[in-house]
Amino acid sequence: WVMPVMPTPRDVECLVCAGGFFCEGNLAPQRQCAINSWAPAGAYECNICPANAQQPVETPISTLKECVCSNGYYSLNENLSPPCQACPAGLFKEVVGSAPKTACLACPPGFYSNLLHATTSAVCIPCSHAGALRNLTSARGSTMSSDC
């Protein structure tokens, strides 16, 4: 994009669009990428964060690595960037942010959950709901009522 430079409007200076923004060319000003998308400096279009990942804050981001895993998902990469995998049944992850699988927390003993990509401990069902004839306990991270 170009920006007039003083003293006259005919004098212009070419500027590269900043990271997290895209340029439409000519005299159009740079525009910020939409939420959950990113662009490197000088881009003409924005890229969307991968599935199950999102922009961590509302400020512009300029690399794929800045996209983070949504709650209920963990990073498959050592550098903690996407792609993101769902926390398995019996586990949950409440916070947004890229982290290893260990960030998925287990339902406590005496509870179970068969849901994938759970985002809260509220999905952990007490074994007492599994039936009066069953034990009222289960192992940490149990996934079925039959574990009780």
Image: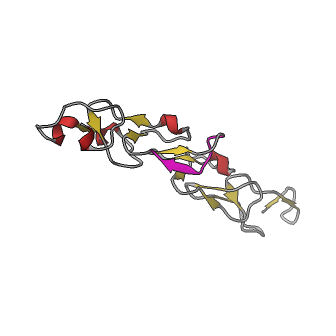
Task: Using residue 114 as the reference point, say whether residue 46 is left or right of it.
Answer: right
Front residue of 96 and 11 = 96
Q: Is residue 124 above or below residue 23?
A: above
Q: Position of residue 135 (x, y in %)?
A: 18, 32
Front residue of 130 and 116 = 130
Residue range in magenta is: 79-87
Q: Quadrant of the C terminus?
A: top left
| Res 47 → quadrant | bottom right
Q: Position of residue 94 (x, y in %)?
A: 42, 39
Residue drawn at x 33%, y 38% is 142
Front residue of 96 and 144 = 144
Task: Using residue 29 as the reference point, say whether residue 104 is left or right of it.
Answer: left
Main structural element of the magenta stretch: helix, strand or loop? loop
Task: Using residue 110 as the reference point, say whether residue 53 is left or right of it.
Answer: right
Question: Does residue 86 belong to the magenta stretch?
Answer: yes
Q: Position of residue 77 (x, y in %)?
A: 63, 44
